[in-house]
Image (tube, grey):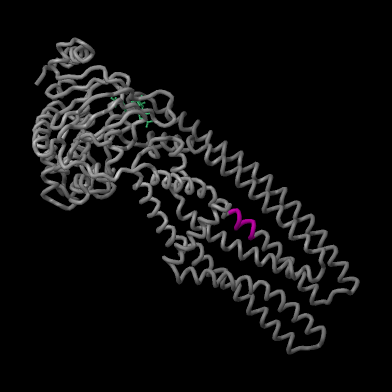
Amino acid sequence: MTRYLRLWTEILGVSWRHARGLTTTVFGIEVGLVAGNIGIALALRAAVDGLVAGDVPAAVTAAVVAAVASTTVLLLNRLHGLIGLFLIVERVGMVLEQRLLEDIAALERIEHLERSDYLDRLTVLRYAPKRIVGGMWNAVRACFTMLQLALTLLLLGSVSPWLLVLLVLAAAPLWCDRAGRKIESHAEISTAEAFRLQRHLFDVATDAAAGKEIRTSQAGHRVAQLQAAAFHEATVGRYSARVRAAWLRAAGWTVFVAGFIACLGIVARQAAAGTATPGDVVLVVTLTINLQQTVQTAVSQLATTMNAGLFLDPYLWLRAYLQQERSARRGDLPPPERLTTGIRLDRVGFSYPGAAEPVLADVDVLLPAGSVVALVGEFGSGKSTLVKLLSRFYEPSLGRITIDGTDLRDIQTEQWRRRTSAAYQDFGRYPQMTFAEAVGLGDIRRLDDVDAVGRAIDAADAQGIVRRLPAGAATRLSPLYGGVDLSEGQWQKTALARASMRTDPLLFMLDEPTASLDAPSEHAIFQRYMQRARQLAARNGAITLVVSHRLSTVAGADLVLVLHRGRLVEQGTHDQLMAAGGRYSELFGLQARAYRLRRP
Ligand SMILES: Nc1ncnc2c1ncn2[C@@H]1O[C@H](COP(=O)(O)OP(=O)(O)OP(=O)(O)O)[C@@H](O)[C@H]1O
């Protein structure tokens, strides 16, 4: 709870800084509502006692005060709906959402995007900021409602101390509601994976690309069944938690209502014995009606607040994770201007967090400065993982990577990334952007540099795409945004062009850069990138690392590394490896026979 309070105080600070007028108004409304509600009861008592005492002016004045207080309460309630729950939540929620996205994007590593338990929390956080802000304002409102509750009970206690017992009884529905929320929150997290899966399967079933495969393979029924099963699992878990929570809440209310009826009996007897004035009777009736409403409001406000608690835990987790990442060991050295020795993998081993088996083990090799290095191996042998380590998305679990002798961990990550370029196997698609922006993104500082973007497009042999786009490079890449969609190969060429934006990388990584391209395009691309590799090598001693399944395309590399189940089993030039007659020559022979390809 202390963690929540700290977070709410912080968000209150954000509200104050970004929406000072609205924040002041909301607090003003809350104070007005408490004063108004208590004022109505006191004014009505004074009006009745005045009438009984024959003091008509006092009775009329009190009645007018009661009327004004009632109207004010009505008005303030309406204003609260607009200002409190809409404007301020929207405004401050937007600030929080932007911070959240910036924080997530600022994470140097990508574990949070690849680990399913972390993804579960991020799924929950997707719509969180406004709900967190809404929860905070609800908590503020709940405090004022509690204040009103305390004042109400104080006044009731002045009539009969027995009525104070209602304060204790009023806690029962609150406690039960809190316990119910916990049950619901737990169910929400534990069914997040099934929930994500059913959404994904729904997308798969309605996605045009997957739709073709589903129809061809006649897997539609199976996908629908899987989707229904995942949906069932998610909803059953959440539904049964809600039912249990509802029973708990009903029990809490039963306790309160029973005590409430008993207390009313006591006051009725007191009134009959003449130990209370007629005004006191009106006060008690008004307050008890209010009390019921106030407790109900307090419960529902606390419920809404606790609902935000569903998001608070993942949000607080993310912040703690950010904190931990920020305090992790950080290098502050700049990368070298140019490579002279190269990049050494010094007995590198790596296991994904939570995985039992290592993905890379004992990889020991020098990628010489100025060379083209090909990384080959079967599916799942660890090639892309090595690319991720070189990009610093993960740290080696064992051993180290050195850049011209300096441990990569000692080099500042941002500066290292500025000196690397990469076309990843799972390249990004940016349908909301124009083609030029989707390329320029490769070097954000030159996003609008038309010449640089043009050169990158040339480097990736992607001028043909631009020519076919209705508005050229200014075309958005989806019909949803008034543009056109690209084919798989065109998206891949866009990713290649993006990776070609930087002109001075020390390490240029191409992970399966031509997997979606046809053979002539593939050949042309490799010719170009070999040329580019030589230019970069001459300029910076840069290394070009190419991951490919098609061995014929990388046979011209200076060094071929063969990975097998995470181990480096062979290394050398194409000719050396062919002469050695090992795994590489076996794979090359198999592919050459299968594709009838020859070394270019
Ligand atoms: N984020 C991850 N978390 C856990 N395991 C992973 C993750 N990414 C990859 N792996 C596992 O690591 C192993 C190596 O994967 P990697 O993608 O590096 O292989 P690869 O050689 O690039 O494969 P491919 O040729 O199919 O692209 C595989 O067994 C894969 O299942």
145 lies left or right of 414: right
Numbered circles on residues, count: 0
Residue under the point 49% across and 67% down? 83
Q: Quadrant of residue 30?
A: bottom right
Instruction: Answer yes or no: is residue 449 visible.
Output: yes
Displayed-image quarter of ligand 1: top left
Picture quadrant of residue 214: top left
The outermost residue toward the front is 405
In the orientation shown, which residue stands out farthest toward the top? 581
Task: Tell me residue 155's x, y (percent).
Answer: 75, 71
At a point 47% along the width and 35% down the height, the residue shown is 193
* Residue at the outermost right position: 273
Q: For the magenta stretch, what is the residue range?
A: 297-303
The residue lying at 21 percent from left, 15 percent from top is 584
Query: In the rendering, at what x and y percent does residue 78 appear?
Result: 55, 69
Which one is in front, 118 or 156? 118
Main SS, magenta region, reads: helix
Residue 309: x percent and y percent? 54, 50
Instruction: State left or right for residue 196 relative to residue 553.
Output: right
Quarter placement of the C terminus: top left
Is 333 part of what is drawn in magenta? no
- Left or right: residue 429 versus residue 48 is left
Q: Where is 526 relative to 324, above or below? A: above
Q: Position of residue 102 (x, y in %)?
A: 35, 51
- Image quadrant of residue 599? top left
Pick the residue in front: 189 or 580.
Answer: 580
Horizontal placement of 8 versus 438: left or right? right
Is residue 299 in the magenta section? yes
Residue 214 visible (yes or no): no
